[in-house]
């Protein structure tokens, strides 16, 4: 049996997400029911079934960030970007996510944009960072 997880990871790396078409094609190539492929893709949170933005803005909601009011920064981002967590801006540039912890507790409140951490945030700092992404 092929390693479906590894194959899905490869697909997602190429496309940025798992499209319905790519999963159907994989199903046909492996002669495995599409429901099995979809089942694996939906079981693991690492797999994304929607196209994501060029920039993934992950706001931390871990204990340290929560205590330092990351929730108000999340609301601020929702208003600024006009999207909710799990959504992508209309221009396809930014996807907003809320995550449990990014491991930057000493810099709380923090966000990670792709692989870069920004900490000790205020609404003013966050607005400047987001403006530079556009």
Image: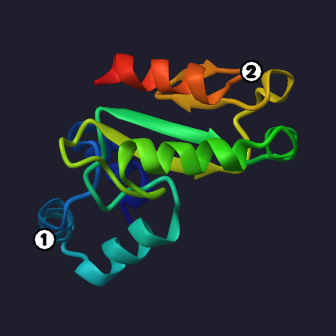
**Residue 123 on image: x %, y %:** 60, 30
Asked if the residue at tag 2 contacts the one at tag 1, i.e. Cβ–Cβ closer than 8 Å, the answer is: no
Q: In this rendering, would 6 be left or right of 124?
A: left
Q: Helix, strand or loop at disc 1?
A: helix
Question: Does the image show residue 3?
Answer: no
Residue 120 is labelled as: 2
Between 126 and 39, the one lying in front of the other is: 126
Q: Using the image, determine if residue 121 lies above or below residue 78.
A: above
Q: CA distance from mark 1 to mark 2?
A: 49 Å
Residue at 36%, 59% (x, y): give it.
2
Residue 83 location, quadrant:
bottom left
Instruction: Pick the residue in front: 15 or 114.
Output: 114
| Number of numbered labels in the structure image | 2
Mark 2 closeness class: few <14, some 14–19, many ≥20 residues within 10 Å = some
In the image, residue 23 sits, relative to residue 106, either above or below, namely below
Residue at 38%, 66% in the rendered image: 1
| Residues packed near mark 1 inside 10 Å, few (<14), some (14 to 19) or many (20 plus) | few
The quarter of the rendered structure image containing the C terminus is top left
Which residue is labeled 1 in the image?
A: 28
Give x and y (percent) for residue 104: 77, 26
């Amino acid at each position: 049996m092929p390693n479906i997880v590894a194959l899905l990871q490869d697909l997602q790396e190429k496309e940025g997400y798992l499209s319905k078409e790519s999963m159907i094609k994989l199903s046909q190539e492996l002669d495995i029911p599409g429901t099995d492929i979809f089942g694996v893709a939906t079981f693991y949170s690492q797999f994304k079934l929607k196209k994501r933005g060029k920039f993934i803005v992950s706001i931390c909601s871990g204990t340290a960030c929560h205590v330092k009011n990351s929730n108000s920064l999340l609301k601020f981002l929702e208003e600024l970007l006009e999207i909710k967590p799990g959504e992508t801006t209309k221009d396809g540039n930014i996807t907003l996510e809320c995550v449990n912890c990014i491991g930057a507790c000493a810099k709380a409140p923090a966000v990670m944009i792709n692989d870069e951490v920004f900490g000790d945030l205020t609404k003013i700092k966050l607005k400047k960072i987001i403006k530079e992404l556009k």
